[in-house]
Amino acid sequence: MKIFVSWPGYDPEDEQTGRRLVEAGHELVLAPKLRARTEEDVVRLADGCTGAIVSTDPFTAEVLGALPSLRIIARVGVGFDSIDRAAADAHGVAISITPGMNAETVADHTLALILALVRKVPQQDASVKAGRWERVGPFTPSELPGKTVGLIGAGTIGRAVARRLAGFGVSICYFDQLVDDFPGATKLASLTDLYARCDIISLHVPLLDETRHLIDAAAIATMKPSALIINTARGPVVDQEALFVALKSGQIAGAALDVFEAEPPDPQAFDGVPNLVCAAHMGGISRESVARMTASATQSILDVLAGSMPETVVNRQTLRIPV
Ligand SMILES: NC(=O)C1=CN([C@@H]2O[C@H](COP(=O)(O)OP(=O)(O)OC[C@H]3O[C@@H](n4cnc5c(N)ncnc54)[C@H](O)[C@@H]3O)[C@@H](O)[C@H]2O)C=CC1
Ligand SMILES: O=CC(=O)O
């Protein structure tokens, strides 16, 4: 069977991944490395394929309707908001993810972004390289002990972030309707409460209808002027335009974005936006996590196409047509 591969971490010669698929009799259809693929790109490139190993390519209802051979989409990662689950259920397309394989990586990245903001690392880097030696002044950093960190979403990644923060002398609170048991962190009854109390607000929710633009102009207006926002969840959880307006006016103190409303973002959007640290959706990426996730996605493809339904398939209970 033909397997569409657009995940950039895929090595067709690797013994744990590409070679295993070929040895099992499958043919790899390697997508060209594009900055972003449109729905038309996916339909054209994955035409006739039975499996797909992907990152954030759009698998909308239209795309799924146009790819009738497809039986499994293996999402390398955990957030599968780029795949229309209801349409996949209706068309009998299994969606697998790689649970728990990049959570610690995202938590490391979140701490890196928090520390970069608090310690003003990017500004110091630019200043030293420009031949300056500014130690006390506008770039004087702050410190973490004594600060209050608010986690929105206390699932796998939120908790991994909290474990790391435990050594920094901060108070940790969180908002997550589904989580009551979170030793070392205080549950808050509302987001309003969290915005009012926290110095650092870190997002760890999936992108859902109710989390789209969770942080908007109205939410930002209730935060402390010293607040820092860190988004390693999904770009549309934050109203990016409202955030940039707030940073420019000094309504809040800084932000770090690993994810953007459109990826890759238009660099012109950053013009004149101060105290913004950016990364290229790198939260879940490390040498180690890429190897783990790619092997897991490969295994899911092999299992499903051999007729079994592994636990990595998130819609195994709701598929309306058996794969
Ligand atoms: N930047 C990156 O590379 C990566 C980003 N992610 C993103 O991080 C998200 C979280 O991942 P996990 O922690 O593994 O997911 P998870 O499912 O373990 O935890 C998510 C938590 O969010 C909570 N939640 C859902 N809606 C909420 C709301 N409206 N308000 C407050 N809490 C809410 C849930 O109850 C759950 O406890 C993923 O869905 C994905 O979008 C994940 C991996 C890598
Ligand atoms: O964005 C990455 C993921 O694992 O989700």
Image (cartoon, rainbow, N blue to C red):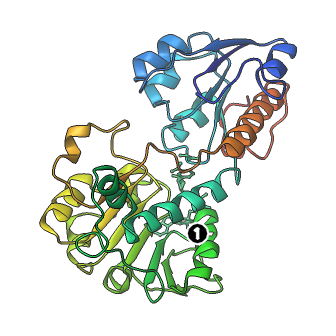
Residue at left 43%, top 85%?
147
Label 1 SS: helix
Location of residue 171 with respect to 102 vertically, above or below: below
Position of 144 with respect to 132 (left or right) is right
* Ligand 1 within 8 Å, label 1 CB: no
In the rendered view of the protein, which quadrant contains the N terminus? top right
Q: Which residue is pictured at 63% across the width and 38% down the height? A: 76
Query: Residue 10: which quarter of the image?
Result: top right
From the viewer's side, name the closer residue of 204 and 32.
32
**Residue at 83% in and 31% down:** 303
Residue at the outermost left position:
249
- Image position, residue 71 (x, y; %): 68, 25
Q: Looking at the picture, how far across and down is residue 3, in whole percent?
A: 68, 17
Residue 11 relative to residue 262: left or right: right
At label 1, counting other C-alpha atoms closer than 10 Å, the crowd grade (few under 14, some 14-19, many 20 or more) is: many
Looking at the rendered structure, the kind of residue marked 1 is Val
Q: Is residue 259 left or right of residue 134?
A: right
The residue at which mark 1 appears reads as 161
> Tag count in the figure?
1
Is residue 105 among the parts visible in the rendering?
A: yes
For this view, does 99 lie left or right of residue 304? Answer: left
- The answer to whether residue 313 of the structure is visible from this angle is no
Q: Position of residue 214 (x, y in %)?
A: 34, 63
Q: Residue at x 57, y 23 (%)?
A: 6
User: Within the image, what quadrant is residue 286 found in?
Assistant: top right
The vertical placement of 105 against 89, above or below, is: below
Above-or-below relation of 320 to 1:
below
